Image (cartoon, grey):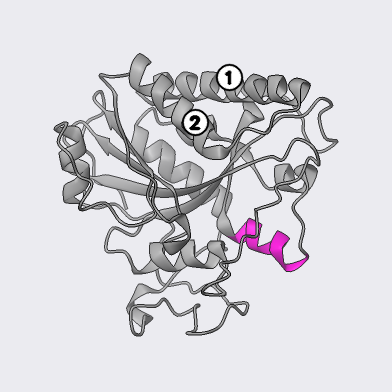
Amino acid sequence: MSQSLKWAFMRLAENTFYTLEHCRRVKHQIQEETLTDLNMLNLKRNHSTQLTTHTFSKHEEGKNGGDWEWWLTNSSRKRWLCIRVQAKVLKLKTDRFEHLHYKSRKSGIYQLDRLKAECAKSKWRPTPLYCFYLHFDSPPHNIRPNRSRTYHFYGCSVAPVNAIEALRKNNINDLSSVLAQSRPWHELFCGGSSSDLLASAKAFLEKIYGAGYQINIADQKDGLPPYVSRGSTSDFQYQSDEPIVVFNSSPPSYVLKIMESLDPDDEVPEGIQSVLVMIDNESEDKDHQ
């Protein structure tokens, strides 16, 4: 299953890369919502037996910092992994992600901080991730292709939030710097030697986060994680008592409704525009640490 998903996400990245190339040629700036919708459409059209997708009406994205949820499970559906994704598209005129360090005018809170805070306090403990839609005419010096990572597969790349926070400290948002912190998103399905979807995703997420992204949910106060202070957007330190990847025994009710083709609009968290459910129908249920 993870191999078929790998190829599906490679094709999506390639399509995104060339879509942005066409946009660059005609001087048209496409938005990340459009690219996300196109990717969701292609997944739904070509992988309907493996994937379930649902797009909601426009929500206020800044309320939780994330606009896309991925739910991964195995054939028994006894273990679930949630990834909350914030998508950003390259501004083609400047080759910068000009809204990478978006800060709400109303609350004064950075979108990135909101994303981490919502992930930390959620009972589902999603892993936060940034996704970048991008294109380049000449590969940046820090990009080196290999058998599974040719240039156009960087069209959809992902990065851990702690890497993006490091860029924010120096107000860095250029393409080359972002790419240096990113990996093509199909590598989510290439983690370790296992073909099991959950094991592969866990290995990849732990690899890109390393020892840097850890949270201590038990230390939350007033619904906020320990690294977020009320009325403050100051720097914080990651804690070390919780794993990067947390498996759940079941998903939220809105995910189950999506899988049954029911309308879940009243239950979806504010800010979530799309939900993608990936089911590994080939793997056996195994206990993982």
Residue ID for mark 1 = 15
Any magenta on residue 163? yes
Residue 289, position in %: x, y?
Answer: 32, 53
Task: Give the residue type that dot 1 points to.
Answer: Asn
Residue drawn at the location 36% of the way across and 80% of the way down: 220
Secondary structure category for the residue under label 1: helix
Residue ID for mark 2 = 190
Placement of 221 over or under 180, stated as above or below: below
Determine if residue 250 is in view: no
Horizontal side, residue 48 vs residue 66: left or right: left
Tell which of 177 and 283 is nearer to you. 177
Residue drawn at the location 50% of the way across and 78% of the way down: 227
Residue at the far top: name it.
46
| 1 or 2: tag closer to the N-terminus | 1
| Span of residues in magenta | 162-170
Secondary structure category for the residue under label 2: loop
